[in-house]
Image (tube, coloured by chain):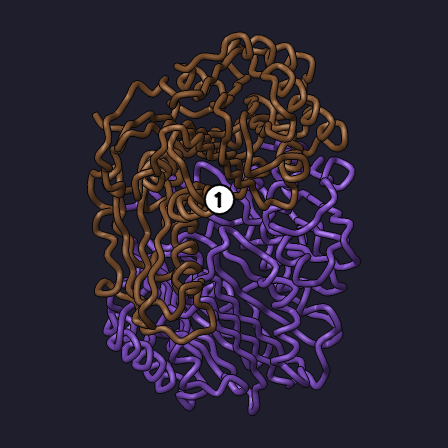
Chain colours: A brown, B purple
Amino acid sequence: MSFFGSRWVATPEVDELDPAELPPSFRAAGVACGLKGGGGTDLALLACDADAVESALLLTRNAAAAAPIRVCRDECDAGAIRGAVVNSGNANAATGEQGYRDAVAMRDAAAEALELDPRALAVAETGVIGVPLAIDDVVRGIGEAAAAMDPRGGDGFAEAIMTTDRTPKRCAVRAAGITVSAQAKGAGMIEPGYATMLCFVQTDASIPDADAALRAAVGTSFERITVDGQMSTNDTVLLQASGEAGRELPDGLLDAILLQLALEIVADGEGSTRVARVEVREAGSASEAERVARAIANSPLVKTALYGRDPNWGRVAQAAGMALAGESLEELGPDHIDASELGGDADEVELSVRLGRGTYSAHVYTSDLTPEYIRINAEYTT
Amino acid sequence: MSFFGSRWVATPEVDELDPAELPPSFRAAGVACGLKGGGGTDLALLACDADAVESALLLTRNAAAAAPIRVCRDECDAGAIRGAVVNSGNANAATGEQGYRDAVAMRDAAAEALELDPRALAVAETGVIGVPLAIDDVVRGIGEAAAAMDPRGGDGFAEAIMTTDRTPKRCAVRAAGITVSAQAKGAGMIEPGYATMLCFVQTDASIPDADAALRAAVGTSFERITVDGQMSTNDTVLLQASGEAGRELPDGLLDAILLQLALEIVADGEGSTRVARVEVREAGSASEAERVARAIANSPLVKTALYGRDPNWGRVAQAAGMALAGESLEELGPDHIDASELGGDADEVELSVRLGRGTYSAHVYTSDLTPEYIRINAEYTT
C-alpha cells in the first residue's frame, strides 16, 4: 500500500523507500530518556552533515507559546538549521524563565554533541504542560542519541516524537534523482495538554526559496486541518534541504507529502474515526469562504453528525448561517448542500456547500467528534 | 427553594408566585397538535388583552434564519406585539418559500382566533429542521389553544415550547406592586436540529423603553451563555409590558430573571452536568476580553476538563494564547489562572484568568462537554 493513501492526495510519481531511510548526509536517532514513563522513546536527534543546508522553520503563533518555540524564534538561524533536538512527554510550556533556560540548555547540549553551531539547532518539545523539564535526563538522552545517529534513523526519530499518536507518521521517497523523507506527529492528546503538531522534512534536493516552498505546502496541508479548532502552544514544522543532489524538488512533491501527513494527523485525531473535506463554494470573498468552511468544520454538531453517519445538511446550513450572521443569504437547502457522503461507509467523505454569493472557494479537513474524544480529554486528572 | 437558585444571580426582593400565573390581562395555553409525536404539548398561544402593550422582540442574526424569524422581521410591529403563537417539534427552518407561507398562515390563524391585528402577533418555532410544517395540524391546534386560554396558563405555555429540555423553565414573581412572568426553553437538542433558545416575558409594569431594557437584560444573560458556540436559526426573545399596574419595573428585576433563565438553559445544555463562569480580567480592550473569554468557554479541551473535574489551567492558557495569536503576552501560569474550582464538587464553578495587558474584563457562562452530548447529537439519524 502506498504512503499516499488519501483520496485527496494526488499520488506523485515516486519510488517509496523504507521510511527509516534518510537522504544522504542526514542522520537521526530516537532514544528513551525517561520523560514518558513506561520506557518509550522520547528523545530524538536529527542532523545534516552536508556543507550547506537551506532550511525553513514555521512556528505556532499562539501567544502562550512554549519555551522551545520562543528559543527557536529568538536564538535560531531559521534559514540555516543543521539539526534538531526534540523530546516528547513534556511540552515545556507555561514553565516560565526556567523553562526557557532548560530549552536553551537542551539546544546547547545537542549542539555540543553534534558539533554544530547552537544557532543551527532547532528545539521542539511536546507533551505535558506546566511541568518543569527533567533537563538532566534530557541531556543524558542527547548524549545517547548522538552516539546512535544513523542514516537509517528516520523510523526511530518518528517514533520518539510521538505522544498518543496511534501510529508513526513518516515516509521516504525517491524521484527524479532526489530523496525526501519526512516525520510528523499529532494531533494525539498529550497528558494533560493539547494537540501539538510537529513535522520534519529532509531532502538532498535544492530548494531555491525554502521558506516560500514550506509556507506554500503548509498552507495547503497543516493550515487546512482542524481536530478541535485549538491552536497548540508547540506546533513546529522544519524543512531542511542539503542541495547535494544538484537538482530541484519535483513540483508538487512537498505539497503531496505534507498533505498526506496532515490528513494522517486528522485521521489520528483524538478518538477520531472519520475525516471530512468541507468545501465552501460561491462565497463572496476569500475570507468569507474561509470563515464559513471553518465554522462548519469546527461545529460540534457537524462533527457529531460525521461520527453518527448522519447526512444532516441542516446543521451545515446552521453553521454557515452563523458564520454569516447579520448578512443576507439565500436559503440553504439540499440543493445548496451535499452532505450525502456523511451517511455512507467511507472513512474519508466530502461535504460541500454552495453559498450563491460569489466566486470564491475554500476547504478544510476535519475529524469527527466521538465519545472517545471526551474520554481521552476528560477522564484524565492532573 | 427559590427560582433564583444560581450563585451568580443576586436574588431580588420579590414574592414568588405559582409559575402558572400570568400578570393581569395576560392569558396563555399549550395544547398538543401532533407535531411532536408521543402526544406531548407542542402548540402554545399567548395574548394580552390590555388596551396598549409595549413590546420588544429580539431575533437571531443567523443568516440562515428560519421562516418564523423572517416573518417576525418583515411583518410584525415589534414594538406593539399583543400575542405570540409558538410551536415546538418543527423549527420550520430551511423550508423555503412554502415555509414562509406556512409561518404567515400560522400567524394569521392565531390573529383570527385571538381577534388581534396580524401585525401584533409574533410567531416562533423550534424543532426539526428542513421538514415541511404540518400547517393543518398547527391551525387546528391554534383553535384548540385559543379556546383554552387561561390567566393561569403560564405553565402550560412553558411546557408546550419545550423540546428536549429536561425541565420547564419559568417563573412568576410580584414586587413593588407589579407582576412579572417568564417562560424559556433551550438549549436542548432538537431532532435533528440545534439548540434554539426561546424566551417570553410578560409584565403589567410599564417600561418606558422596552427595547433598550430588553437589550440590556439580554446582553447580560442570553448573550453571555454558550453551550457549543452554535448560533441557532430560531432564537427569539419577546418582552411585553401592559403598563396596567401604573408602576415601573424595579431596577434589576428583568436582568435577574433573564440571567436565571439563561443559566438554567446552560445547565440544561445537551448532556451538561456543570456550569462554569469564565472571567477574563486585565485585557487590553473590551473586545479582547470578550474574544479570550469566548475562546476559553468554547474550547472543547476546557469543557472536557470541566466535565472531568480537572483543574487544568494549561488548557486555559492555551485557549487564551490562541485567542491572542500573534500578540505579545506574558506567560500565563498558575498565578494568572485560577482553575481550582474545576476540581471541586460544585455544579457551578468559577474560572478566572488575568491577562496583565490592561483594565478590561468580560465573562461568559459555559457548560461542560460530556459523552451524553455526543450520544444526543450523533446517535440520531435523519
Is there any visible trace of residue B299 in the rendered image?
yes
Above or below, A339 against A55 in this view is: below
Above or below, B140 against A336 in this view is: below
Q: Quadrant of residue A327?
A: bottom left
State the residue at coordinates (57%, 90%): B52
Label 1 is found on which chain of the structure?
Answer: A
Is there any visible trace of residue B311 in the rendered image?
no
- Image coords of residue B291 (percent x, y): 62, 56
State the residue at coordinates (42%, 45%): A213
What residue type is disc 1 on? Asp
Please name whichever residue, A363 or A272, is drawn nearer the observer in this view of the structure: A363
Q: Quadrant of residue B332?
A: top right
State the residue at coordinates (73%, 65%): B14
A187 relative position to B303: left or right: left
Above or below, A291 against A344 in this view is: below
| SS assignment at label 1 | helix
State the residue at coordinates (59%, 79%): B24
Q: Quadrant of residue B319?
A: top right
Give the total number of marks visible in the rendering: 1
- Image coords of residue B35 (percent x, y): 29, 62
Q: What residue is disc 1 on?
A: A211
Please name whichever residue, A293 or A60, is drawn nearer the observer in this view of the structure: A60
Above or below, B342 against B295 in this view is: above
